[in-house]
Image (cartoon, rainbow, N blue to C red):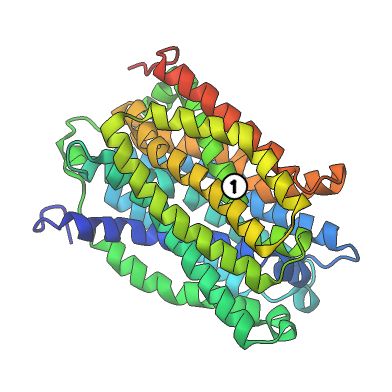
């Protein structure tokens, strides 16, 4: 379907554009959900800690490719169009997903196994570098006036659907298969399912129309012009990165790292950890559009300042309380509180980032800020959390990491909305 085809409904368009976002995030979460099994299959070691660290390092390596993807693919989308760029990112991501799903274990092909897993993760990271930015910008440009916060929130909400689906699938597998079977080959089943879904999502995304706002632009910047504008607005990109640090750190802490934390630290069963992750996904799914819509009414900055401040002052105390009073119910309560902080902050922040970046570099600037935050902070949250606990002996120490992220979000909100950092044309 081309840009000249008949108009699509808003609901249909949201489903079409976020479908690729769902599958992209689905595979990212699977890597974290099954980190223990992946570590044994591809990174065998006498030390469970060393094996897990290598796995999370590989998980984090994918995020290092995001800034490169943001610049190259983001520039392509700002120059060629939103629709074509989103189709391209889906194709690159599909290649990385298939590699992780079908690569034989270390026992079969030796060192080639972890190397190929790393390549697959790098491809996923490269495409993800612009996926979230491309989807967010598309949603902001197709939104009805006065409702951008609500529409853009569905970018993050689609990620929660991926979490819910992944956790539910993991729960079913753990209930229907023995631990030995899952550790041997059963953990690959969700990756195979992802590969089966990709062709369907690809057809859905191909039917997207170009946004009217992009079509109305009289000048589409060259790559050199985009790079020049990014350089001029470097302070804005860095401030945007600081805004997103709170989003990415809290998100990966309460989703990807939760199963590992529940199993390895809290000594809960993997089923209980997956159930908590499922409830967190549901909670996020509710709070994101609610707070996105609220930000349309009262403004972005009050919500961003309040919830980044709450993260700064409550992340460690709540995790410390959990560690001192370990139970399934207490972990669920703490995770839902952190989910409330994440969903509320993110519901206002993502749309805010689309608004503060100049239109000529909207996708590139958004994606670069988001990618830097993820590459330098959020993506390494499972690795940092594992390291902090091992080094300090404090099981609640990941709370310090989230508190730091909350502080950065609070500072960035003040810099941007007090006019200290402004866009330059």
Q: Nearer the viewer, residue 89 or 200?
A: 200
Task: Name the residue tied to disc 1.
Answer: 63
Residue, x 68% and y 71% (percent of image)? 270
Q: Which element carries disc 1, helix, strand or loop?
A: helix
Q: Nearer the viewer, residue 143 or 323?
A: 323
Q: Farthest residue in the left direction?
A: 6
Q: Is residue 24 visible?
A: no
Residue 370 on image: x %, y %: 49, 38
Residue, x 55% and y 37% (percent of image)? 246
| Figure quadrant of the C terminus | top left
Left or right of 200? Residue 30 is right
Q: Farthest residue in the top direction?
A: 420
Against 378, residue 297 (above or below) is above
Q: Nearer the viewer, residue 115 or 269?
A: 269
Q: Farthest residue in the right direction?
A: 46
Left or right of 180? Residue 130 is left
Residue 385 on image: x %, y %: 73, 47
Left or right of 249? Residue 212 is left
Residue, x 29% and y 42% (percent of image)? 293
Residue 326 on image: x %, y %: 74, 58
Mark 1 neighbour density, 10 Å: few (under 14) some (14–19) many (20 or more): many
Quadrant in which residue 248 is drawn: top right
Q: Nearer the viewer, residue 212 or 47?
A: 47
| Figure quadrant of the N terminus | bottom left
């Amino acid at each position: 379907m081309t840009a000249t085809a008949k108009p699509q409904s808003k609901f249909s368009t949201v489903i079409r554009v976020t479908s690729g976002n769902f599958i992209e995030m689905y595979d990212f979460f699977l890597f974290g959900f099954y980190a223990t099994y992946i570590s044994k299959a591809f990174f065998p070691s006498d030390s469970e800690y060393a094996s897990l660290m290598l796995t999370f390092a590989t998980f984090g390596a994918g995020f290092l490719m995001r800034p490169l993807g943001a610049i190259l693919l983001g520039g392509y989308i700002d120059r060629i169009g939103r629709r074509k760029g989103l189709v391209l990112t889906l194709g690159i991501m599909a290649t990385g997903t298939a590699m992780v799903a079908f690569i034989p274990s270390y026992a079969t092909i030796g060192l080639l196994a972890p190397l190929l897993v790393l390549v697959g993760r790098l491809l996923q990271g490269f495409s993800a570098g612009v996926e979230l930015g491309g989807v967010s910008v598309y949603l902001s440009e197709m939104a009805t006036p006065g409702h951008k916060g609500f529409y853009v929130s569905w970018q993050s909400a689609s990620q929660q659907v991926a979490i819910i689906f992944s956790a539910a699938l993991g729960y079913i597998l753990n209930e229907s298969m023995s631990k030995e079977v899952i550790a041997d080959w059963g953990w690959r089943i969700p990756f195979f399912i992802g590969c089966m879904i990709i062709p369907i999502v690809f057809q859905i995304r191909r039917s997207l129309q170009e946004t009217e706002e992009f079509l109305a632009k009289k000048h589409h910047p060259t790559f050199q012009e985009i790079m020049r504008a990014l350089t001029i607005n470097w302070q804005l990109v860095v401030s945007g990165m600081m805004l997103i640090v709170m989003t990415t750190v809290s998100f990966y802490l309460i989703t990807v790292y939760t199963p590992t934390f529940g199993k390895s630290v809290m000594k809960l069963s993997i089923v209980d950890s997956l159930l908590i992750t499922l409830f967190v996904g549901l909670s996020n799914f509710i709070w994101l559009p609610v707070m996105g819509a609220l930000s349309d009414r009262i403004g972005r900055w009050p919500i961003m300042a309040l919830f980044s401040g709450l993260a700064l002052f409550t992340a460690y105390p709540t995790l410390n309380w959990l560690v001192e009073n370990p139970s399934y119910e207490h972990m669920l309560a703490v995770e839902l509180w952190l989910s409330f902080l994440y969903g509320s902050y993110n519901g206002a922040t993502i749309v805010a980032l689309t608004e503060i970046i100049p239109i000529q570099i909207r996708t590139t600037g958004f994606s670069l800020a988001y990618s830097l935050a993820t590459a330098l902070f959020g993506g390494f949250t499972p690795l940092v959390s594992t390291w902090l606990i091992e080094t300090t002996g404090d099981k609640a120490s990941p709370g310090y990491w989230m508190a730091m992220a909350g502080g950065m979000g609070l500072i960035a909100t003040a810099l941007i909305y007090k006019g200290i950092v402004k866009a330059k044309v």
